[in-house]
Image (cartoon, rainbow, N blue to C red):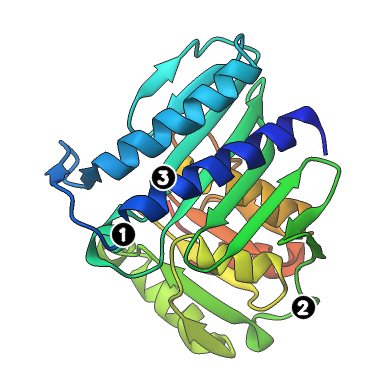
């Protein structure tokens, strides 16, 4: 492991201790301006991650879901969602995780996705493959939509688009349809257990680390128009192969 990855994993492990202290406990919930919840667990977890990373790399930038941006013009920038899935966290079900990504001059190069309750830590660094709990993982070799398993997540805004009917055709074309959501369907995709993910209503902090993991496992990860991810990305199409990915893009015609 490089020093970057060692530090990211150490931060994720420290974050897990904070999260588990609060999970299923009693805490106040505040609603942010975007109408999403935030708790003391989110804030303490991010502060823990921030200290570990900036102590190790004081010249790096930091962009956190709860504490905002520091040194955003730096060559290296860390993208952090301390508890991705706070709505699940506060309701007491386990679909939440810590997301830590590193961007170098605008390119995502490292990702750690840790789920305390699932006991799954996935991680990847550009050029070094993807790993889940210390075991190397790869996407499946399914090569057609007809054979694919598709997972949908956060699709409320898609349902208001003219392309909703096209999504319906996709759903009727695949082998199986699921809705695992959040971090979990990306872990499944990178491990070869499902083959397609379609999602909207996300932000880059939700998906940056997962994009690196899926790509290093051999998969494809873009937005729903086929474009590269950016800080403004709000949609995802992730798949196991270029052929399947391109066919979905052409059939959905999202804009």
Residue marked by disc 1: 89
Q: Nearer the viewer, mark 1 or mark 2?
A: 1
Where does the image place residue 141, in percent across and percent down from the top left?
A: 81, 76
Please tell me which residue lies in front, 177 or 10: 10
Residue shown at 61% from the left, 9% from the top: 59
Tell which circle, 1 or 2, labels the residue nearer the N-terminal end: 1
77 to 199, vertically: above or below = above
Where does the image place residue 205, in percent across and percent down from the top left?
A: 46, 40
Q: Is residue 84 visible?
A: no
12 to 221, vertically: above or below = above
Please tell me which residue lies in front, 102 or 142: 102
Residue marked by disc 2: 143
Judge the density around disc 1: few (<14), some (14-19), many (≥20) Cα neighbours within 10 Å.
many
Q: Which mark is residue 218?
A: none
Tell which circle, 3 or 2, labels the residue nearer the N-terminal end: 3
Q: Residues at badges 1 and 3 in contact (C-beta under 8 Å)?
A: no
Residue marked by disc 3: 18
Which structural element holds mark 1? helix
Q: Nearer the viewer, mark 1 or mark 3?
A: 3
Please tell me which residue lies in front, 26 or 150: 26
Where does the image place residue 175, in percent across and percent down from the top left?
A: 59, 90
The answer to whether residue 99 is left or right of residue 146 is left
Distance of label 3 from label 2 (alpha carbons): 42 Å
- Which picture quadrant has residue 148? bottom right
Judge the density around disc 3: few (<14), some (14-19), many (≥20) Cα neighbours within 10 Å.
some
Residue shown at 63% from the left, 25% from the top: 106
């Amino acid at each position: 492991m490089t020093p970057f990855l060692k530090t990211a994993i150490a931060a994720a492990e420290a974050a897990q201790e904070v999260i588990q202290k609060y999970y299923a406990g009693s805490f106040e919930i505040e609603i942010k301006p975007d109408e999403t919840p935030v708790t003391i667990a989110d804030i303490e977890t991010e502060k823990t991650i921030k200290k570990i990373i900036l102590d190790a790399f004081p010249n790096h930038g930091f962009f956190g879901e709860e504490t905002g941006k520091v040194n955003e013009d730096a060559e290296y920038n860390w993208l952090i969602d301390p508890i991705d899935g706070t709505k699940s966290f506060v309701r007491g079900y386990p679909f939440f995780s810590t997301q830590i990504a590193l961007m170098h001059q605008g390119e995502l190069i490292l990702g750690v996705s840790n789920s305390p309750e699932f006991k799954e830590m996935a991680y990847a660094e550009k050029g070094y493959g993807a790993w889940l709990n210390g075991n190397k993982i790869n996407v499946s070799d399914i090569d057609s939509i007809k054979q694919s398993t598709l997972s949908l997540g956060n699709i409320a805004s898609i349902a208001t688009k003219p392309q909703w009917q096209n999504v319906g055709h996709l759903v009727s074309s695949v082998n199986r349809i699921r809705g695992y959501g959040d971090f979990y369907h990306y872990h499944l995709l990178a491990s070869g257990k499902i083959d397609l993910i379609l999602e909207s209503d996300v932000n880059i902090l939700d998906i940056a680390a997962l994009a690196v993991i899926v790509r290093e496992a051999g998969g494809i990860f873009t937005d729903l128009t086929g474009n590269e991810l950016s800080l403004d990305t709000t949609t995802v199409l992730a798949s196991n192969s270029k052929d399947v990915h391109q066919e979905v893009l052409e059939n959905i015609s999202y804009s």
